[in-house]
Amino acid sequence: MTNDSFTFFDIDGFLFGLFDPTSTSETVQMGNNCVVCIRVEDADKEYSRIKEFSRIAAPVNSVGPYRVFQIEDSEGNVVELYSSSNGV
């Protein structure tokens, strides 16, 4: 499954996706370009729910058909949560 920004692989029911940062003109650094992305039902609701007790790396915004935001885990790793209107 592929679109302009992502290529997805279904690995025994686990959806593994690769994001192409050039599709949105993002700059990346070596060593800082692997981000775990977790699909949620509604990114805006999740952001409202967890913003008080999480370290926000990037507030909720739109990237193409996706609503995304990023948090930092306890070790400083970035985790992205996203929702989509097209079901991907």
Image (tube, grey):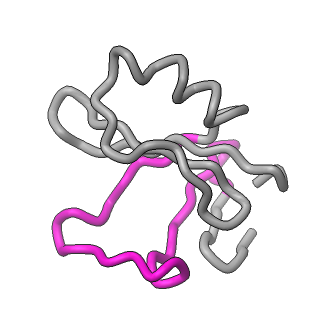
Q: In which quarter of the image is the N terminus?
A: bottom right
- In the image, taking residue 6 as reference, residue 36 lies left or right, namely left
Q: How many labels, in total?
A: 0
Q: In which quarter of the image is residue 66?
A: bottom right
Q: In which quarter of the image is residue 74?
A: top left
Tell me, yes or no, whether the highlighted magenta stretch contains residue 35.
yes
Q: Where is residue 79 in the image (x, y as percent from the top left)?
A: 38, 42
Residue shown at 58%/26% (left/top)?
46
Q: Position of residue 58 (x, y in %)?
A: 38, 47
- In the image, taking residue 16 as reference, residue 73 lies left or right, namely left
Tell me, yes or no, whether the highlighted magenta stretch contains residue 53.
no
- In the image, taking residue 5 as reference, residue 24 lies left or right, namely left
Q: In which quarter of the image is the C terminus?
A: bottom right
Residue shown at 62%/33% (left/top)?
44
Residue shown at 31%/43% (left/top)?
57
Q: Position of residue 18 (x, y in %)?
A: 51, 66
Residue shown at 81%/50% (left/top)?
85
In this view, the residue in front, 70 or 1, is 70
Q: Quadrant of residue 2?
A: bottom right
Highlighted range, magenta:
10-38
In this view, the residue in front, 47 or 35, is 47
The answer to whether residue 78 is above or below residue 20 is above
